[in-house]
Image (tube, grey):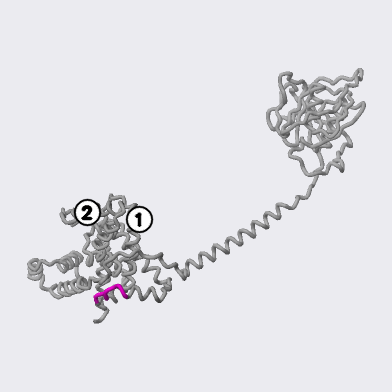
Amino acid sequence: MSIPSGMDDLLWRLAESADIKEKAEFVSKHPEYIDELERRSKLLARFRESTPNSGARRRFVPSKEVAPVQVMPNWLIAGVATAVLGSVVFAAASFVRWQTAQTPPTTQLEKPSIDLSTPKVNSPEVQYRADASKQPTGPDATSNQATIRPPGSEPTAPQDSIQPAPRSRWDSRITLQAENTTLTNAVLAIAAQANVTIEIAPGTPDPDIAVSYSNQSAKAVLDDLGKALGFTVMVQSDHKALLIPARDPQAETPPNVGSESVVPPTGRIELTPRPGKTLPPANPNL
Amino acid sequence: MSSVFDPGKVQAFDEDSVLIDRVLAGDEEAFQAIYERYHDKVFAIARGILIDPEEAADIVQEIFTLIFRHLKRFDRRAKFSTWVYRIAVNRSTQQSRRAKFKRLFVPLTEANDRADDREPPMPSDPRIDRALARLAVQDRALLTLFYWDELSLQEIGDAIGCSANAAKTRLFRARERFRAFFEEEED
């Protein structure tokens, strides 16, 4: 017999109730539920009668420590096993990774591409910037600058320079000793040793010089040359710099992108006058 | 039901506070009074959830030990009785679940000690016990709190951590399930 929800609630409430009069009224109205009410009343009465009597001791005796769990549930065992296994795998992977990191990487020197930008008269490879007075401001700025590729100058790094890579190419130690050379050639030698590209902007002086630097950083040597010869080294990246004429006497050090530390050089530089040699002005028509 | 003013409960509440203050002041006899006041209700909860009277008697001791040790934590915002019932339900439920996985190694001497100082429990109704044993632990706790300890729906809700309405709904379902199991069992 299906009992409506409302009637079901009422039957339980009456079965729990001790009010005989209320039960009698309900039975008179709903005689079809007499048996159901009787069953529920007996069930609840029997349940209540089974209320336990502990027969317990009447003194409180604090319990000893709860006995430890002797057997873990299976899910906990599985969880612990998974965690242990995962830890072992992780540790092994970490060890392998650490060992791989310890192996020194193979040093591979890329062939230096030397772009020396300097205006050279009668050189077929010379290209002049349209407006030499403008300073390079964007990534394309260098494309308009004068570029010279000295013929047959495929620079190679000296064998003794194969060392662990320094923090920056501008920190590369170079040795430069030459008598009766030009600034361009000196810069060319620096670029070859440091494996960098150096562009020389139009208007940069190109005097004959004698230089002597031993085991100095490339940046320091360039800065020293710049101080002596009147140009500024604009480091544009780890492997590229631009030499621009003139030097701001107020500026301590030009913007330094690639090199973090410049050791003051202890080398020697001398100007060796060569009468009659001057740099031509930039030609805006080219 | 729970909103009706009950002078007896208010009095019990005040007496509980006095007893708690005395216990916290170091009067261990006051805790004996608390133990005697709540022992039967706590035992009914443990017995209804664990079914086994011996195990229930042991858990009752643990429950009162917990109450004794943590009495300082009782913040008095709720009724002390509610706090006691909640501990009883939680500890008994925990024990019921742990019993499936746990093997208790009880030294023989200790087992004998336990048997000596306790009156034998009143014989239980086997049919009721069998039907109860087939219920979920939460259902057993609800029926026990309502029919054996005669708590209000609000008190039950406080003890098991739900509202009075939720307690009423759960109680209704638990009662239906109990009835189904009971009618399947034979005397």
Q: Left or right: A257 with respect to A108?
A: left
What amino acid does circle 2 point to? Phe
**Relative to residue A209, is residue B93 depicted above or below?**
below
Front in this rendered view, residue A200 or A91: A91
Is disc 2 placed on a helix, strand or loop?
Answer: helix
Residue B157 visible, this angle: no
Residue B70's label in the rendered image is 1
Going 20% across and 65% down the picture, which residue do you hit?
A5
Residue A41: name its quadrant: bottom left
Q: Quadrant of the N terminus of chain B?
A: bottom left
Identify the residue under disc 2. Answer: B13
- The segment highlighted magenta reads B116-122
Q: Where is residue B84 in the image (x, y as percent from the top left)?
A: 29, 59
- What is the distance, in whole Å, between disc 1 and disc 2 at their CAs? 18 Å
Going 26% across and 74% down the picture, which residue do you hit?
B119
Q: Which of the two discs, 1 and 2, labels the residue nearer the N terminus?
A: 2
